[in-house]
Image (cartoon, grey):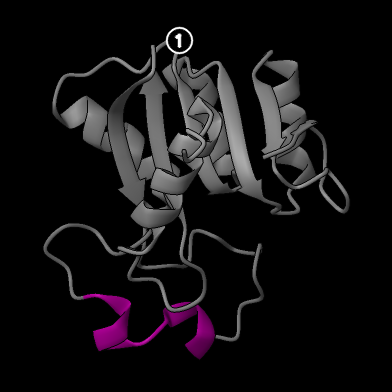
Amino acid sequence: MTTRPSWDEYFAQITRQVAMRSTCLRRQVGAVIVKDKRILSTGYNGAPSGFPHCAETGCLREQLRIPSGERQEICRGLHAEQNAIIQAALHGVSVAGSDIYTTHQPCITCAKMIINAGIRRVISLECYPDQLAQSFLEQAGVEVVLYGHGGSGCIGGTSSGQ
């Protein structure tokens, strides 16, 4: 008999699958917003709806030699967390009191959106070194969980095993 995955593992696997839809040339990121064990919305990083993908146009950040984690406003794409929150809003779905599963810890811009959307818990599968984002989430009382990572090398958050 196979072992059923925990709810966290179940949603973590779905988050990894969502990331596979990403059109970013640098990093494939996925996000899944969940409340009461039900998926409310998903998102992945990529260009706005109707725009050509970066695979077609090239990466603006690569062309301008912008290092990862810097000058995030200079990018054609939206982040996975942004797209998940926007998709929920577009379809009239409140995400207040929900959890968001992300393949990578949120950046400061996404952290601020998560806080204002009323999301109560962030479960990240991989690190993303943004101390300010972690500080904001902590100040807002948003629980940050580094799922299956053991916490080594990550900024902030509690660790959870798989």
Q: Is residue 54 rendered magenta in the image?
A: yes
Above or below: residue 81 compared with residue 49: above
In reply to whether residue 111 is colored magenta, the answer given is: no
Q: Over which residues does the magenta segment extend?
A: 53-63
Which of 130 and 39 lies nearest the eye of the viewer? Answer: 39
Q: What x and y, as percent, mark residue 24?
A: 40, 71
- Could one spot residue 105 in this view of the protein? no
Residue found 45% across the figure and 47% down from its top: 13
| Residue 121 in view of the camera | yes
Q: Nearer the viewer, residue 8 or 97?
A: 8
Count the labels in the image.
1
Q: Residue at x 59, y 63 (%)?
A: 71
**Can you say whether 55 is above or below 100 in the image?**
below
Vertically, is 47 above or below 56?
above
Q: Is residue 116 left or right of residue 133?
A: left
Q: Position of residue 84 (x, y in %)?
A: 33, 38
Q: Main secondary structure of the magenta part?
A: helix
Determine which quarter of the picture holds residue 151. Answer: top right
Whether residue 127 sits left or right of residue 111 in the image: it is right
Mark 1 is on which residue type?
Gly
**In terms of image quadrants, where is residue 81?**
top left
- Displayed quadrant of residue 141: top right
Residue drawn at x 40%, y 12% is 96
- Read off the residue under disc 1: 97
Q: Secondary structure at mark 1?
A: loop
Q: On the rendered structure, is 76 left or right of 154?
A: left
